[in-house]
Structures are given as structure tokens and as C-alpha cells.
Image: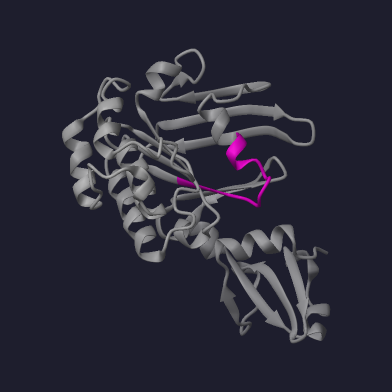
Amino acid sequence: MENILEIRGLSRGFEQFQLKDINLEIPKGCIMGLVGENGAGKSTLIKLILNLIHRDAGTIQIFGMDNIQQERQIKEQIGVVFDECHFSPTLRAKDVDSIMKHIYQNWDSACFRQYLSRFRLPEKQSIKTYSRGMTMKLSIAVALSHQAKFLVLDEATSGLDPIVRDEILDLFFEFIQEEDRGVLISSHITSDLEKIADYITFLHEGKIFFCEPKDRLLDDYGVLKCTAEEFNAMDKGIVLGHRANRFGVEALIRRKDAKAGQMMDPAGIEDVMLFLVKGESE
């Protein structure tokens, strides 16, 4: 399977933080969810992919092209949405259309107006009157109106109500149905990624902690609840992380390591992150 994004040996250092030796692939036709705590390096990685900051080492290829040497060709085919709308609040949606047609060679005004209609966004009303959900929909409409093949989304659903988030997630899922496309979505809302992502990459302290198919991640892990005595008697070699509470102990283990009769709760993406990073290890 061809990859829409390939990163090899990527590093970028700052005074108090370093993104270290990142290797990552996003196959065509897939959605990659990027997770990690604040300061883990998610936004830094996205800025490096978009060549908004310069890398210290490594390579980034998008559509098989170097993201620096062939930046213009690449950005014609990328749709980007950040967690804040960066259009002037005095502009109207119709003004955005007029501006974008001079920026993107493949800008499609008819497509943009279709998204405005679908999202119920008034063309002649200034952006400063929009709600947060409306401004995010406007940004997404722009990202999708120039025949983009790769969406890069940095906390694009944060702060939105569940109904708006669900509507936007459906749109991303529609986008990916054409198999030559790809999506990279950074989000703190792991339930959103559980709905739509094909792969999950977990960044922790500037390094990739794991990168796994989402379904395998959710199928492989479980949370075993037991008493302190039962936990002390367990083979600690199978415990990936544990937390003690007033009711006993919760332990993250792989389902294949569970003994017959042991009851486990499903482990979501957030559970896996918390146990692997914040849970006590043996």
C-alpha cells in the first residue's frame, strides 16, 4: 500500500523540549489519530509536516515529494484546520471565497458554497458573529474546497458540542472514502478517534510511544480489576501498568494473558495512555 505521508528520523530541538527520531507512515485511504498529553510534541510535529518550522534532522515526504523542496506542489493538495479560525473576524464567507480563489489553483467556489449551505453558514454575515462551531465549519469548508487529498487537523473538534463534533467526524469519514486520500488528526478527545481512526500514534515526551492499528489496540488490551492480594499473586511480567485505589487494584494487561475466568473491562485509547504513562509499573 502506498503511503501519503512518510517521516524518517525526524528531530527538532528547542531549549527545553526535543522531538526525537520520529518515524511515521500514513497509508493512503487511512485516518491517523495523533494523541498525547499537552507538550508531548503533537503541534510541533504538525508544524514540521507543514514546513512552518524547520527540522534539525530527518526527512518528510508527502505524496512522495519532499515537504521543503516541493512545498508549493504539496500545499496545493493539503487541507489544514487548526483549533482556532485564522480568518479576520471582519471578513464574510463570501470574502473568504474571493481570497481563496487567488491562492489555490484548484479552488472550487461552487464546492465551497455547497459546504456553506450544508453547514448553514451565512455568506454575508461577518465571521465575528459566528459561534465556535460555525468558525470551525468554515475552516473545514475551506480545507475541502480545493481538491485536497490530505487533511491535517490540529484539535479541529476541541470545544465543540457533541452534535457538531459528530457532524464533522462524518465529514472526515466521507472524505476518506476515496482511497487516494489521507487524514492526520490530532485530538485530546479520544472517543472521536475511536469512532473514525484507522491507526493511533501516541506521542510522549517528544517520542513515539506506540503506533498501532486502532482496532488491534482496542482488542489487545483490557483492564483487570482485582484485590490487592490477587494483584500481589499475579505474574507481574504481564502487567503493563497498574493503579491502586480504595477498592483494590486496576491492571492493564493484554487480553491473551488473562487467565480463564478473569473478568476484564474494555480498555479505550485513553485507558491505554494513562496506564502506560501514569500508571505504576513493575
Question: Residue extending furthest top?
Answer: 69
Residue 43 located within the stretch drawn in magenta? yes
Q: Is residue 67 above or below residue 162?
A: above
Q: How many marks?
A: 0
Q: Quadrant of residue 10?
A: top right
| Viewport quadrant of the N terminus | top left
Residue 166 drawn at (x, y percent): 36, 60
Q: Nearer the viewer, residue 236 or 45?
A: 45
Residue 242 drawn at (x, y percent): 75, 70
Horizontal side of residue 204 vs 216, given as left or right: right
The colouring scheme, among rainbow, by chain, secondary structure or one colour, is one colour
Horizontal side of residue 23 vs 25, given as left or right: right
Q: Quadrant of residue 252?
A: bottom right
Q: Is residue 237 above or below residue 171?
A: below
User: Is residue 239 at all visible to an observer of this figure?
Assistant: no
Residue 33 drawn at (x, y percent): 50, 48
Residue visible at 23% across and 53% down in the picture: 120
Residue 115 drawn at (x, y percent): 23, 44
| Viewport quadrant of the C terminus | bottom right
Residue visible at 35% across and 64% down in the picture: 163
Q: Quadrant of residue 236?
A: bottom right
Residue visible at 50% across and 48% down in the picture: 155
Q: Nearer the viewer, residue 155 or 260?
A: 155
Q: Nearer the viewer, residue 124 or 112?
A: 124
User: Is residue 81 at all visible to an observer of this figure?
Assistant: yes
Residue visible at 66% across and 50% down in the picture: 38
Horizontal side of residue 116 vs 142, given as left or right: left
Per the rendered image, the range of residues in magenta is: 32-44
Residue 225 located within the stretch drawn in magenta? no
